Every structure is written in structure tokens, then in C-alpha cells.
Image: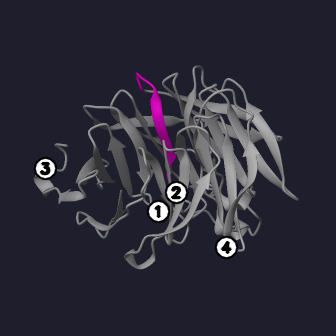
Amino acid sequence: MCLLLSPPPPQVSVINTVDTSHEDMIHDAQMDYYGTRLATCSSDRSVKIFDVRNGGQILIADLRGHEGPVWQVAWAHPMYGNILASCSYDRKVIIWKEENGTWEKTYEYTGHDSSVNSVCWAPHDYGLILACGSSDGAISLLSYTGDGQWEVKKISNAHTIGCNAVSWAPAVVPGSLIEQPSGQKPNYIKRFASGGCDNLVKIWKEEDGQWKEEQKLEAHSDWVRDVAWAPSIGLPTSTIASCSQDGRVFIWTCDDASGNSWSPKLLHKFNDVVWHVSWSITANILAVSGGDNKVTLWKESVDGLWACISDVNKGQGGVSALPEGQQNEQ
């Protein structure tokens, strides 16, 4: 498994390769907030945490608690301590916490009737809230209320047949960067996006403590495999990336603060399923990984066109930066 560092494009280099010693396929790998720890999960039912400082790879923890393939892991913000969530085919979500150098299971959620495919922590401004998407079609929201207690809210039938991905909107009011500050604390509205087996991307928002469907985004012709809401510094435009079994990646943008009008732009049509999309922290580069066994990096040009700036062959650690003339031919 390779970790990628992206200096100014198109130079992309493999900075570290970690031998996880997982005994089966790795489904997810996530760096913590500081980039010093790496969490991985696998079909071997384990979650592993490595110290990857200075190019090293020291196994810190080998967490066992799931009874099926573990699909995804997610780090909470460090202001809440060292906390990691994992979800599995076994229908469980487990929240792990490090106490005095030892990782332990701190909470186990068993409220889904089928595989839990995605977990995503809300922006830390909202507290410790975890969204969980499941093949039973429901999305659960787990909120920490203190003293080891978690409150559960569930959106039933969020996606018919199943939910594959969840991603929170940043806790930034669109347009706040250029609007005059009023001195008042902004009125944050909690939102997240989800993708499902109904070929839809949906946007959910909290109103009076209840979660309601705000938007239904239609463009894909097969299961939506992943959604990623782009980070924001307060510019007027909100952006979501989605990818699908249909081989297509769409970039959805919304220019009005009310969040009512979203328009899709096709980034690229690949020849195979696209499994994951992931934004850089500055939201100007999108990483895309798919069934062609490649990770490609994409950047938007000033004229609004998206160009492939490099591709990485998964497994081999090979990297190629594309010459200017080939950037749109991927």
C-alpha cells in the first residue's frame, strides 16, 4: 500500500510503502489529523494502526472485534482524543479509543440489519457525531452525549437497496469568506451527502433536530460507490464529487447559499467501476481510484475543465506525470 505526497503538480512521488501484513485485501487506509498515524482495515477482519513518522512503519495496534470484512475506517478530530471508527460486513460499527497508550473498544453499534459500508465523522465544530451508511438502506447518526453514552438517530430508507457512502459538508457557511462579518456566530446548518444503490446522490440537512432529504442529485446510471464533499474556506460555491459503477465521475456544484440548485459536470468516463474519490485538503485536486487498478489525480483549470495531472499504478508504486498535451486524454 502506497502513501502519496503531492507537491505542486504534476510531480507526484511515492514517499512510503507500508507492509501491513494484512492476510487479505485492504479496503481502506486513512491518515490521522497530524499525518503521523495510518489506520488500515481488511477482509481479514482486523483494523491496524501504524506509526508512519519519518518514513517508518511501527505497528501500534491490531484491533480485533469485527466478524467480517472491515470496509472503512475514520479518525475523529484529535480535540476529542485518539478515536477511530470502523464499519464492517458484520453489520457493526465499532468506535475505538486510545487510553494510556492502549487501544480499546469504547462503543459498539449494532443497529443495522445488513453490512455497514461507510463511516464519516462530522466537522469537529458539531461535536462527536458519526454518520454510518448501510446496505439495509438506512443511515445512522451516532452522537456522543458524554459519560460513555451515544445517542442514535436513524434515517430509514435513505437509499432503496442500500447506502454505499456518506460525506459531511464542511462547517463553513458558503460565501462567508467574502461577506462582511457581522460579529455574530454563523448559523451553521448540518449537512451531509450520501450515495446509494438507487443511482442517486442525496443531500441531507438537519432541521429542528430531525434529518430531512434536501436534494436528490440524478446523473449516474448505476450504483453510486462514493461521494466526497469538498473542503471549503468560505467561497460561495459548494462542491461534491461522486463516482459510480457506471465508470463516471461527476463534480456537482452549487452557487447559491440556500443549497437548492446543484449542477453536474462530467469529470471523466472510465472503462471500469470507480470505487473512491478523495479531495486534497485545499480542494483543488481530486484523487480517483477504480477497477483499472490506478489512482489518477485531477485538477480544474482556469477555464473550468478538469485535466488528469498524473496517474499512479496501485500495487506497483509506479508514478507517471502526464505531459501537458496528454492531460485530457486519460
The spot of residue 202 in percent (x, y) is 58, 32
Q: Which residue is mark 4?
A: 101
* Cα separation between marks 3 and 2: 28 Å
Q: Kindly identify the residue that appears in the image at 32 percent across and 66 percent down.
A: 6
- Is residue 264 depicted above or below 325 in this figure? above
Quarter of the rendering occupied by the C terminus: top left
Query: Can the viewer see residue 232?
Result: no
The mark that comes first in sequence, 3 or 2, is 2
Q: Which residue is mark 1?
A: 281
The mark that comes first in sequence, 2 or 4, is 4
Q: Kindly identify the residue that appears in the image at 57 percent across and 34 percent down.
A: 89
The spot of residue 324 in percent (x, y) is 14, 56
Q: Which residue is mark 2?
A: 231
Mark 2 touching mark 4, by CB under 8 A?
no
Left or right: residue 300 versus residue 320 is right
Say whether residue 330 is magenta.
no
Q: Mark 3 or mark 4, which is nearer to you?
A: 4
* Cα separation between marks 1 and 3: 26 Å
Q: Mark 4 or mark 1, which is nearer to you?
A: 4
* Cα separation between marks 4 and 1: 29 Å
175 and 204: which is toward the camera: 204
Local secondary structure at mark 4: loop
In the orientation shown, which residue stands out farthest toward the bottom?
54
Mark 1 touching mark 2, by CB under 8 A?
yes
Residue kind at label 4, given as amino acid type: Gly
